[in-house]
Image: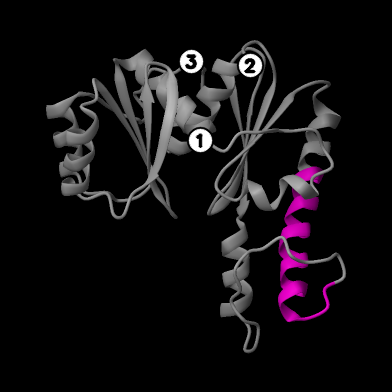
């Protein structure tokens, strides 16, 4: 069976997705992305193809390891993709954003798509019905907002995210949860409304590790897909190998 490993090295987590043929069968959280960890995964799955999307300063030697053991592709500015990037400096587009847009175009061709990723930052990414990535916007993510309030005040604690809160917070923790999570949900709904004023019809794809905290609070119609980036990486890997 044809096996493909797709690696996503983000600011918060390092992850690997295992595809057998075209089916995503498993996602793993990596400890540190060391050469030894890569070798262990390669020995376990014996992939035919591999792809790496990285927005961090990773150990460069793992690229050589993946290239020696598989048909390897490093996602970057020279990658062949299924959309155009008519933005000012396409080489500055994050690898993760390229993968998410590729997934949207692959799943919803010839349609407008707004892809919203909830991770370290919130990224809004718009690709039109001619498969042209027009850009979008970036704002602070959930954990970044919790940390900012803790680090830039004398008394506010650093809390863990939770959906156990009400609109009207009754203590410090629930005030922080309500402010950050409902505030971000209102931001997301507001950005979607702004796009609705400009584009008559489009799909909204919500992805990223934090989506479970926001889906219950959003008023707009969305497609929630936590593994969207991996589906994009798989499509890009197929196109470049």
Q: Which mark is residue 78?
A: none
Q: Nearer the viewer, mark 2 or mark 1?
A: 2
Residue, disc 3: 82
In this rendering, would 169 be left or right of 48?
A: right
Label 3, secondary structure: give it.
loop
Q: Is residue 7 magenta?
A: no
For residue 170: magenta? yes
Q: Position of residue 240 (x, y in %)?
A: 33, 16
User: Which image quadrant: the C terminus?
Assistant: top left
Q: Viewer-proximal residue, 231 or 192?
A: 231
- Which residue is identified by label 1? 97
Which residue: 67% across, 24% down? 113
Count numbered badges in the picture: 3
Q: Is residue 111 left or right of residue 190?
A: left
Q: CA distance from mark 3 to mark 1?
A: 13 Å
Residue at image position (38%, 17%) is 80
Residues 39 and 82: in front is: 39
Residue 207 is drawn in which quadrant?
Answer: top right
Query: Can you identify the residue that label 2 sits on?
Result: 108
Q: Give the residue at x 79% y 50%.
A: 217
**CA gap, disc 2 to disc 3?**
12 Å
Instruction: Measuring from the top left, give residue 37's x and y in whole percent.
Output: 21, 47
Mark yes or no: residue 98 visible.
no
- In the rendered structure, the answer to whether residue 74 lies left or right of residue 36 reads right
Comparing marks 2 and 3, which lies closer to the viewer? 2
Magenta region: 169-190
Crowding around mark 1 (Cα neighbors within 10 Å: few <14, some 14 to 19, many 20+) is many
- Tell me which label, 2 or 1, sits earlier in the chain: 1
Give residue 128's position: percent from left, percent from top.
66, 19
Look at the magenta stretch and give its main secondary structure: helix
Callout 2 secondary element: loop
């Amino acid at each position: 069976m044809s096996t493909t490993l797709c690696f996503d090295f983000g600011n918060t987590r390092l992850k690997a997705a295992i595809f057998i043929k075209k089916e995503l069968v498993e996602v793993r959280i990596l400890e540190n992305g060391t050469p030894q960890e890569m070798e262990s995964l390669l020995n376990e799955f014996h992939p035919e193809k591999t792809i790496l999307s990285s927005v961090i300063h990773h150990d460069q030697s793992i690229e050589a390891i993946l290239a020696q053991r598989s048909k390897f592709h490093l996602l970057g500015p020279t990658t062949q993709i299924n959309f155009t990037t008519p933005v000012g400096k396409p080489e500055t587009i994050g690898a993760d954003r390229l993968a998410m847009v590729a997934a949207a175009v692959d799943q919803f061709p010839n349609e407008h798509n707004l892809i919203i990723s909830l991770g370290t930052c919130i990224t809004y990414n718009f690709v039109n019905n001619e498969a042209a990535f027009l850009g979008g916007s970036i704002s602070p993510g959930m954990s970044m907002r919790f940390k900012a309030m803790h680090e830039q005040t004398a008394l506010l604690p650093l809390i863990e995210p939770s959906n156990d809160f009400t609109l009207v917070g009754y203590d410090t923790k629930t005030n922080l949860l309500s402010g950050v999570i409902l505030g971000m949900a209102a931001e997301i709904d507001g950005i979607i409304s702004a796009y609705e004023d400009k584009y008559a019809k489009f799909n909204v794809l919500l992805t990223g590790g934090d989506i479970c905290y926001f889906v219950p609070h959003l008023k707009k119609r969305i497609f929630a897909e936590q593994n969207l980036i991996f589906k994009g990486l798989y499509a890009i890997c197929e196109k470049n190998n």
